[in-house]
Image (spheres, rainbow, N blue to C red):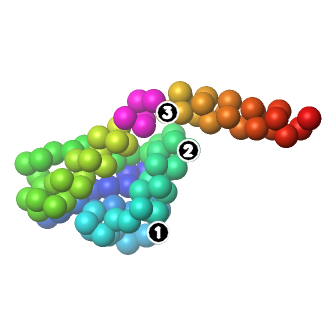
Amino acid sequence: MNYTKIENNNVYFRLSYTDDWKLISDIIGDDLIKLIEKCIDEDDFEIEEFNESLIKNEAHKIIYKSIYQKIKEIQINKDNIIDENTQRYNDIIEKYSK
């Protein structure tokens, strides 16, 4: 599922198929956390390619460039992130199972 789109010189995001598209400038911390969780959990997670020439709103350009870069970094390191979290979880279980 694609969670972002560039349309009419602005960037929009949503957190599910049923959600209305919201301006990227309205994104809050909880929304970012949900996007990151979806990025890690969903195999079909997609976001629109960052294209500076399509975004005329300067605030949207700055916000989306940062989000896009971080999400792409997470996608590249997704397996390592999952492995690290699994190891931490197993360590905690082992520690408190004794």
Residue closest to the eye, 29 or 43:
29
Q: Nearer the viewer, mark 1 or mark 3?
A: 3
Q: Residue at x 33, y 61 (%)?
A: 13
Q: Secondary structure at mark 3?
A: helix
Please name the amino acid that badge 2 sits on: Asp
On the rendered structure, is 89 left or right of 28? right
Q: Nearer the viewer, mark 2 or mark 3?
A: 3
Name the dominant secondary structure of the magenta segment: helix
Q: Which residue is mark 3?
A: 78
Q: CA distance from mark 1 to mark 2?
A: 18 Å
Q: Which residue is mark 2?
A: 41
Q: Secondary structure at mark 2?
A: helix
Residue bounds of the magenta highlight: 73-77
Residue 18 is labelled as 1
Count of residue discs = 3
Q: CA distance from mark 2 to mark 3?
A: 9 Å
Please name the amino acid that badge 1 sits on: Thr
